[in-house]
Image (spheres, grey):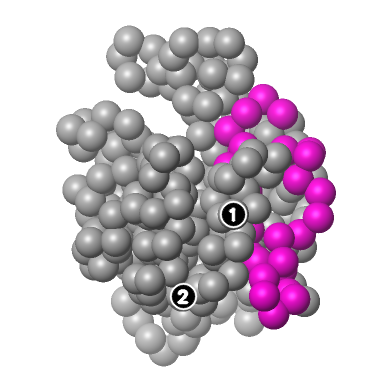
Amino acid sequence: MTPPPFTLGPALLFCPADRPDRYVKALDRADAVILDLEDAVTPDRRGAARQALVDNPVDPERTIVRVNAVGTPDHADDLAALARTAYRTVMLPKADGTFVGPLVGPDGGPYAVVALCETAAGVLAAPALAARPDVVALAWGAEDLVASLGGTSSRRPDGAYREVARFARSSVLLAAGATGKAAIDAVHLDVGDLDGLRAEATDAAAVGFAATLCIHPSHAEVVRAAYAPSDADVAEAREVVQAARLAAAAGTGVLTVGGRMVDAPLVRHAESVLRRAGWQDLPRDDDAP
């Protein structure tokens, strides 16, 4: 049994699993919540966090649970608590080649896994992880990656990512795209830097990321706006798709729209814009912009 494709996003908001009072608030602010049993919870609070996870259910269709990494003492206990809930999407931190068997739920089927590539081994294993049928999305993380390399900072003084982080980001995106899986961009740790977050989320949407991880409720609104095409973008995309359909009917492969040559890749760009805007189907020929 293969999990369904990952469709959550674009704003995925972390929430400490030991703070059940925040579960609903996080869901109200974001497209999905990540109830975190790992980094957001101190080791002495993880037992309470697991119980809170069981006792305070929220919408399982919009919830991801981040468990502790395979091989850690908490991993098995996290899965045991997860089995007592309706949640079936798991974020697996520090995923790499040691992630062997599927994470199996109480019904015997595999959990849908978001593999978090946040170590050197994880980034190099991204293609193999993306090829797994139980992995529905790849995410990446800069800080654990740099820590795994013995470094001290993922960003330059101007706030831009250093080259190794940019390489990891691109590697995860390409591995996910090569297998038709979703790619999820990393968190922006500077809570007050909304301009920097907006720029990164806008770039993430432009290159094909499906979602961005958020650490603060204020980030969710910024990410949503960055991923949403403008009215002008939607109008232009509709014009391109409609013109392409008419050209195809006439047997023409390349066309000109607004003075610009448009070929097959640019038509696909336009279709992506329409999907991000919420279109389920392409516009009809008679549905003029």
Q: Are marks 2 and 1 in contact (CB under 8 Å)?
A: no
Q: Amino acid at mark 1?
A: Asp
**Is residue 89 or residue 274 the one in the foreground?**
89
Q: Amino acid at mark 2?
A: Glu
Q: Nearer the viewer, mark 2 or mark 1?
A: 1
Residue carrying label 1: 77
**Is residue 276 or residue 106 the one in the foreground?**
106
Q: Residue at x 56, y 55 (%)?
A: 78
Residue carrying label 2: 61
- Say if the magenta span includes residue 104: yes
From the top left corner, tell me how far across and down residue 29 is, in percent.
Answer: 23, 61
Q: Secondary structure at mark 2?
A: helix
User: If you read the primary sequence from the N terminus, does the residue marked by circle 2 or circle 1 appear first?
Assistant: 2
Q: Residue at x 39, y 45 (%)?
A: 45
From the top left corner, tell me how far across and down residue 226 is, in percent.
Answer: 30, 50
**Is residue 254 or residue 192 the one in the foreground?**
192
Report the Cα–Cα distance between label 2 and label 1: 23 Å
Magenta stretch in the rendered image: 92-121
